[in-house]
Image (cartoon, grey):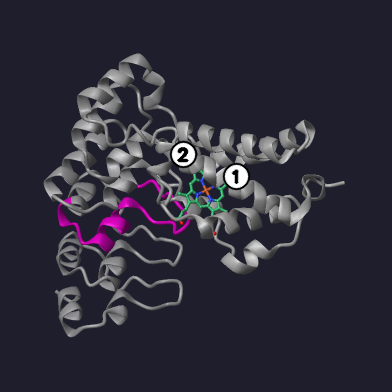
Amino acid sequence: MGVYDAVGGIEAFRRISKRFHHKVESDSKLMELFPKNMVALEERLALFLTERTGGEAVYTGARGKTSMICRHAHLAIGSEEATRWLAHMKAALEEEGVSDAISTQLLSNLTELAATLADPLVHLYGLPIAALREKLEEDPSLAKLNDHGRNLICAAAISWDVPRLRLLLEFGAEIETSDTGGHNPLYRVANGSGNEADGRAALELLIAHGANVNQVTGVGGMTPLHMSARRGTVAIAEALLEAGANIEARDSNGETPLRRAVNCGKEDVVRLLVAHGADPLSRDRFGRTVVEAARSERLRNLLQG
Ligand code: HEM
């Protein structure tokens, strides 16, 4: 007999889900994340568990194929929250009278899933810098930790947080680590926005620590220069060029940084790249030149000097 039948079918899962959510309601730590009204969630969890244990696939039919990671991405779930979630589920299964063997089987499956949802670093991202230093002194391995692509240095890179980057590098953070999108810290800086002086300082710090300005990361085949061209961050693009970024690098569509800037209408970066000799006649993989792709007369004029 499979887990679904051994538990007692969908009605048993509905009772388990109800018990589980009652326990969540009296857990003030978890209630910081859960909504007050959990009626809809009760049914969704029952349907999810039904499907996951081999019952009818009604959950996906009703809610779509979005992964559990995406459904939880907006929540600050750390290791402690995951442990509490699992403890409430264990207690709910016990109250339902599910046998130890079946409960252990189901819980080990859910423990694996919960580990992909929980970010062990979630409580460290927003810590004041002095408190983060204390944590790193207690446990320097946190600077290098990469759990399913979650790591402190990419988070600091995204927000152009130079003091935090400096601290993490001091504790041995890795310059070529990658996040959930497969991108490294340098790419994340190039993907950022805000005060460009901070962005430039963040970029220079990473480059001084050996970051490769021409490293392609993620699925689109883009370099950091492609990314800053899309964002229109002139100071970042300039710093990348000064550090030797390849101005004619091609992404997976055969597009150069100049083409990306044109696509996104980022005139200041177009001007900068043209001044540095970027080729307005380079062709993408469909044979279209950058000039042909420009949507306005203004952009075409900029491209033709
Ligand atoms: C194996 C572990 C887990 C499973 C199987 C699970 C399952 C689910 C399911 C099926 C939903 C409904 C999604 C939908 O269709 O809308 C949901 C939502 C939710 N889960 Fe989990 N979950 C798990 C872990 C956690 C943890 C550790 C937390 C945090 C303590 C958590 C907090 C929430 C919250 C707050 C929602 C409501 C999200 C919203 O509607 O905005 N879950 N979960």
Residue occupying image coordinates x 23% and y 48%: 240
Looking at the picture, tell me which residue is in the foreground, 215 or 12.
12
Identify the image quadrant of residue 229.
Answer: bottom left
Stretch of the chain drawn in magenta: 213-235
* Secondary structure under the numbered disc 2 in the rendered image: loop
Q: Is residue 179 magenta?
A: no
189 on left or right of 73: left
Q: Is residue 228 magenta?
A: yes
- The answer to whether the residue bearing label 1 lies less than 8 angstroms from the nearest atom of ligand 1 is no
Question: Is the residue under label 1 in contact with that under label 2 (CB below 8 Å)?
Answer: no
* Secondary structure under the numbered disc 1 in the rendered image: helix
Q: Amino acid at mark 1?
A: Arg
21 on left or right of 138: right
Q: As displayed, is residue 167 above or below residue 297?
A: above
* Disc sitting over residue 19 in the figure: 1
Can you identify the residue that label 2 sits on? 26
Identify the image quadrant of residue 292.
Answer: bottom left
Asked if one can make out residue 284 in the rendered structure from this viewpoint, the answer is yes
Place of residue 238 in the rendered image (x, y in percent of width and height, measured from the top left) = 17, 52
Place of residue 181 in the rendered image (x, y in percent of width and height, measured from the top left) = 44, 50
254 on left or right of 267: right
Label 2: few (<14), some or many (≥20) within 10 Å? few
